[in-house]
Image: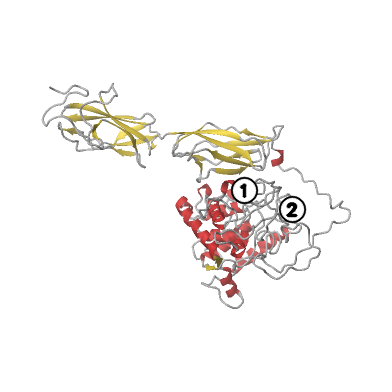
């Protein structure tokens, strides 16, 4: 997934403190330490130094639903009545289509990235926190939400500033980006992180199957193993770099691990509180058009503020926490100027970027199947050549190639550091050899891209050895009892998948194929004295086919060569029992 959501500002320390206090209170009320599954509880799950130090995150530390799971473990099915028991059963219900999407994403990642160990319950926990499980499962039969789920427009007014990157295709906003869909992607990230999870040929952030699969791939990038608590912390924090967010998602993950059940679409429990202080508003609301400014978060898409603050009607399926009064927009305090004059928005770091420069990238070369030792470094600069930090640089692998970044992705987005430099993840060479182009561009800024060339060479070996030392002998017209097996290495390490050619040569000085003496058999049973297209196995081993002898006697040579220049010459003796043989390449006795 690589979900890159809207960079929405957490409003005020007070609301963050309230969310943190609520999580802390729940942590104190439950047993500390290890849970039923041998994992740390959220209260003990410390962010890793690498993740905590990150200056970027999937959601840009955006608002999220802070509703906590019930203290009581979930029941197998909802129970009647009120109180914690009934609430626990209700909260553990996940809408049928949404639950199916999570489980299908888990199965897909089990095949694509088995080392990740992604549990569907993690997708459910994040889906709960981000959108209340697609607003309680308000999706159609194909899994597409009934109306778009949009976050606030990221116009810098109380939120981060991310100008439009998709011409409004996904969020309906041609001025600014907005987080979209049940897993809350911003369009610029969906352009490279989107997945087709339901096989309809489209990548739609509003479709729960597509969004869940994208989220799974995002959480599994960087070769993270989510069965390891440290990697799990990193993955969750990369969605939203907040300790409170990590704790909350871990609570829901633990809760769903203890039990969850399917409920009909559209009947899921809707959350009511957000980390920015809103109650049942903003993220998770159906919004067919661009929402209003953040001062009226309860009325997304409205063209003007309501005339009064009269409460809205009771709860409805598309209004999480329905019944909450719609706040009246704040009036302009005296002496603050003309309210009709829009405030001047200061330029963002992205706005100041004039061009990209190479930041000392070394020559990019790797053998097929190997990781590149060098990494691409790009610097963002102003027109005057000054470095620009905190700018997102997107690295895209172009063309028909199976070379990827570590983790199997073809696109990676990295923020520039204080020196204006963004370092791309390590490249992993595929099996297709040749030149690969990696293009660096600035996200949200139309400046020329910077292309890097990486070369993938064929797998090679610098040494070949025979695994056995038994003499290879045969009577004229017979067959050799032992088969020749060789081992290829490169720099002392196993050289797997290396192309090998075996030729029965005329002499030590003449590498052309012999026309007599030992031979291999072709598919038609006829003599073959050159075999090409052979490859070493995962252990660098290759066992050649059985050898046969014609009527010519003497000592003959088998030459085995590989890409990279490794060569091995093996002697083959053809002689009747009790007779001596001439030296290699000599003519057989008459």
Residue 342, placed above or below residue 82: above
User: Is there a contact, CB below 8 Å, between mark 1 and mark 2?
Assistant: no
Residue 581, placed above or below residue 259: above
Depth check: 249 or 288 in front? 288
Classed neighbour count for the residue bearing mark 2: other residues with Cα under 10 Å, few (<14), some (14–19), many (≥20):
some
Give SS at disc 1.
Answer: loop
**Do we see residue 566 in this rendering?**
yes
Q: Is residue 283 left or right of residue 545?
A: right
Depth check: 123 or 290 in front? 290
Residue 173, placed above or below residue 86: above
Residue 238, image x and y in percent?
A: 59, 51
Residue 433, image x and y in percent?
A: 45, 34
Mark 2, residue position: 158
Mark 1, residue position: 53
Q: Is residue 123 left or right of residue 336?
A: left
Classed neighbour count for the residue bearing mark 1: other residues with Cα under 10 Å, few (<14), some (14–19), many (≥20):
few
Label 1 or label 2, whichever comes before in sequence order: 1
**Residue at (69% x, 37% y) in the render:** 353
- Tell which residue pokes out farthest to the right in this image: 335
**Do we see residue 43 in this rendering?**
no
- The C terminus, quarter of image: top left
Residue 300, image x and y in percent?
A: 71, 58
């Amino acid at each position: 997934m690589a979900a890159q959501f809207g960079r929405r500002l957490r409003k005020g320390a007070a609301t963050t403190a309230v969310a943190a206090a609520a999580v802390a209170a729940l942590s104190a009320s439950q047993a500390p330490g290890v849970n039923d599954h041998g994992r740390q509880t959220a209260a003990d799950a410390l962010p890793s130094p690498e993740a905590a130090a990150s200056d970027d995150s999937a959601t840009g530390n955006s608002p999220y639903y802070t509703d906590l799971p019930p203290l009581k473990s979930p029941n197998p099915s909802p129970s009647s009545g009120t109180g914690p028991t009934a609430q626990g059963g209700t909260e553990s219900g996940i809408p049928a289509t949404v639950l199916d999407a999570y489980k299908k994403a888990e199965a897909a990642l089990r095949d694509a990235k088995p080392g990740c160990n992604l549990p569907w319950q993690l997708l459910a926990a994040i889906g709960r926190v981000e959108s209340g499980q697609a607003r309680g499962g308000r999706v159609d039969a194909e899994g597409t939400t009934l109306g778009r789920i949009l976050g606030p427009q990221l116009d810098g007014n109380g939120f981060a500033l991310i100008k439009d990157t998709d011409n409004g295709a996904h969020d309906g906003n041609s001025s600014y980006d907005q987080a979209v869909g049940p897993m809350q992607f911003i369009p610029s990230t969906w352009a490279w992180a989107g997945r087709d999870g339901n096989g309809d040929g489209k990548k739609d952030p509003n479709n729960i199957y597509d969004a869940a699969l994208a989220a799974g791939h995002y959480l599994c990038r960087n070769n993270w193993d989510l069965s390891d608590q440290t990697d799990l912390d990193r993955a969750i924090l990369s969605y939203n770099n907040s300790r409170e967010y990590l704790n909350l998602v871990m609570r829901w993950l633990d809760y769903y691990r203890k039990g969850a059940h399917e409920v009909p679409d559209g009947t899921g429990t809707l959350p009511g509180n957000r980390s920015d202080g809103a109650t049942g508003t903003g993220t998770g609301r159906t919004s067919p058009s661009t929402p209003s400014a953040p001062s009226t978060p309860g009325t997304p898409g409205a063209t003007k503020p309501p005339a009064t603050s009269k409460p809205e009607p009771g709860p409805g399926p598309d209004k999480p926490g329905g019944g909450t009064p719609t706040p009246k927009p704040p009036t302009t305090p005296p002496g603050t100027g003309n309210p009709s004059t829009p405030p001047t928005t200061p330029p963002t770091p992205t706005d100041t970027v004039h061009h990209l420069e190479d930041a000392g990238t070394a020559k990019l070369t790797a053998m097929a199947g190997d990781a590149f030792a060098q990494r691409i470094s790009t610097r963002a600069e102003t027109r005057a050549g000054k470095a620009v930090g905190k700018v997102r640089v997107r690295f895209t692998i172009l063309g028909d190639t199976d070379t990827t970044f570590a983790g199997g992705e073809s696109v990676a987005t990295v923020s520039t550091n204080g020196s204006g430099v963004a370092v791309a993840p390590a490249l992993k060479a595929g099996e297709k050899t040749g030149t690969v182009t990696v293009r660096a561009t600035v996200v949200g800024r139309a400046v020329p891209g910077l292309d890097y060339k990486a070369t993938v060479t064929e797998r090679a070996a610098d040494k070949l050895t025979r695994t056995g030392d038994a003499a290879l002998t045969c009577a004229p017209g017979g067959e050799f009892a032992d088969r020749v097996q060789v081992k290829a290495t490169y720099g002392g390490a196993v050289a797997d998948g290396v192309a090998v050619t075996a030729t029965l040569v005329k002499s030590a000085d003449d590498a052309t194929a012999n026309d007599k003496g030992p031979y291999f058999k072709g598919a038609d049973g006829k003599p073959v004295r050159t075999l090409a297209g052979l490859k070493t196995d995962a252990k660098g081993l290759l066992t050649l086919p059985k050898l046969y002898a014609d009527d010519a006697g003497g000592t003959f040579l088998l030459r085995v060569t590989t890409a990279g220049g490794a060569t091995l010459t093996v002697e083959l003796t053809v002689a009747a029992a009790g007779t001596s043989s001439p030296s290699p390449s000599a003519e057989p006795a008459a």
